[in-house]
Each structure stands twice: as C-alpha cells, then as structure tokens.
Amino acid sequence: MVVQWDQRGAGKTFSSDIPAESMRLEQLVSDGRDLVHLLRGRFAQDRIFLAGHSTGSILGVLLAQQEPQLFRAYIGISQAANLETSESLLYAFALRAGEAAGDRKALAQLREVGAPPFRNAKQLQVSQKWVNEFAPDRFGAITLERLRLLFFSPEYSLADLVRLVRGEKFSFDHLWREFFAVDLFGQAPRLEVPVYFMEGRHDHVVTSEVAEEYFHALEAPGWKTAFLVRAFCSLAPTRRAGEIPPTHGRARVAGVVAGVGDPGRAQA
C-alpha cells in the first residue's frame, strides 16, 4: 500500500483558509510526522517506508533525520539537497544552451537577471523559463503529464485541478525562500535509516549532480543505494520504472510521498 500525501497548501489539501504564517518548512515536517503516526496506528505497524519527491525530498530527509525510529528506509526521488547550487547549475545550462542556439532574447534576459543567488522570485522565474525552454525534457511536459493523469484519475476532480494550480502558486510564494536556504550537506549529513536514491540522469528540475554529491557525502547505516535512470525529467522513476532494479526488500505497509506542490518551481 502506498499513501500519497499532498502536503499543506498543495493539491487536494489547498484551501484559501490556510494561514499564510503556517506555510513554513518546520510546519510541513510536523504535518508529515502527524501523518506517519496516523498511518502506523491505522495499519498497526511500528515502522513504514518514507519516500520524498523533488522538494518534498527535503521534507523526507528532515523527517527521517528527526524520527528514524518510525521508518524502515528512506527513498529520495529526484532528491534535492541544495536548491541554490542546483539553480546555479541550471542557470549555467540555460546560458550555454542559449549561446549554442544563438537565442539573443534568452541571453539578454538571462544576463539581465544574472547568476544565482537570486534576489527575488521574478529572477528565479526568468531563469527557470529558459531552462524549461532548452531542457530536452521540459518541465512543461511534466506538468501536462500530471494534468493528464489528474483528468483520468478516479481520485481527482476538476475542482482538484483548480486547487492544484492555485496551490502550486500559493506554496511557491510562501516557501521558496525557505526551501532555497536549505543545505542538507550541513543540516542532515547522516541518516539513521537505510537510504535509496532514484535520479533522472539528465534531470533539469532538480539536478542529479547535486543529488549524487549528497548521496556520496551522506552517512547511513546498513546500506545506501542510488539508481540513475536514463531519462531526462524529474519524473524519471515513474516514466522509466523498468530501468530501476528491485530493492533489497518489499514495503509491507505504506510509503509517504511528499511534494506534489513544488515550492522549488516558480509559477509565472
């Protein structure tokens, strides 16, 4: 059984009644902890598997670090570790791609905002716009795939589509600065649970280079395993599932997937 969690302010959990001041990283981790306790009680399990995707993987690492006794293992999918470093690599990619394409508009806009760290959301939006334009598997295509899945899923309605769009902007507006200040290399150098990473080799949403560097630096007992998938996008583990080898064990109960609303992606 897998439990999909739309974190506070994202997807099905979005509501205009959510207090803006509650949109903090610490609160999201606390929400995740509450959900884990609920699942353990409902399914009579001492420990469960925890998975985090994209910026939700930041929540996953912090939760696994704080409450290792609750988890059998942690699975990071498109693992984020330092979004500032990732955005610097992505900005450099967009600049190189713009130069190769001779795209004067892209180069002018990228050079105007300059390289990270960005001072405001508008600069981040400009950089990500051109990353999306030049990436082999663009983030826009990921969004379209998510919408297709939403339209054909019995679990989601048209109203949920509206909540998805509003929730992503709401989450980004209130969380991007705090998420970009996270550095898991310093904040979470060790996890007391087994660790798996699943990364798209050419991910242009959360760069696999930073994830690999964090994986090698991370201390974990027992084992840690990384799977690099020959796909371009942040959804590589779902779109290329056949390339992921079987793990050392099977999940007996539930996994929590954090991060449907992605505060690391700018909303225009």
Image: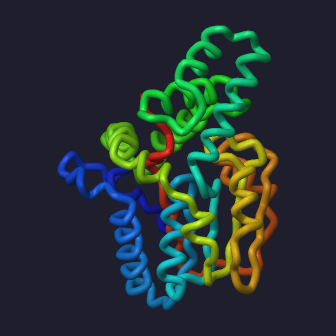
Is residue 158 visible in the rendered structure shown here?
A: no
227 to 194, vertically: above or below: above
55 to 197, vertically: above or below: above
Residue 118 position, x and y percent, is 50, 35
Is residue 247 visible in the rendered structure shown here?
A: yes
Q: Quadrant of residue 61?
A: bottom right
Q: Quadrant of residue 145?
A: top right
Q: Position of 227 compared to 116: left or right?
A: right
Nearest the viewer among 80 and 38 is: 80
Nearest the viewer among 4 and 96 is: 96
Nearest the viewer among 257 and 194 is: 194
- The residue that appears at 31% across and 55% down in the rendered structure is 23
Residue 158 position, x and y percent, is 35, 39
Q: Position of 63 compared to 76: left or right?
A: left
Residue 255 position, x and y percent, is 54, 71
- The residue that appears at 37% across and 46% down in the rendered structure is 171
Looking at the rendering, in which quadrant would you find the N terminus?
A: bottom right
- The residue that appears at 79% across and 17% down in the rendered structure is 100
Q: Quadrant of residue 73?
A: bottom right
Q: How is the image coloured?
A: rainbow
68 to 171, vertically: above or below: below
- The residue that appears at 51% across and 57% down in the rendered structure is 182
Total marks drawn? 0
Q: In the image as oriented, which residue stretches furthest toward the left?
A: 17
Looking at the rendering, in which quadrant would you find the C terminus?
A: top left
Residue 212 position, x and y percent, is 75, 58
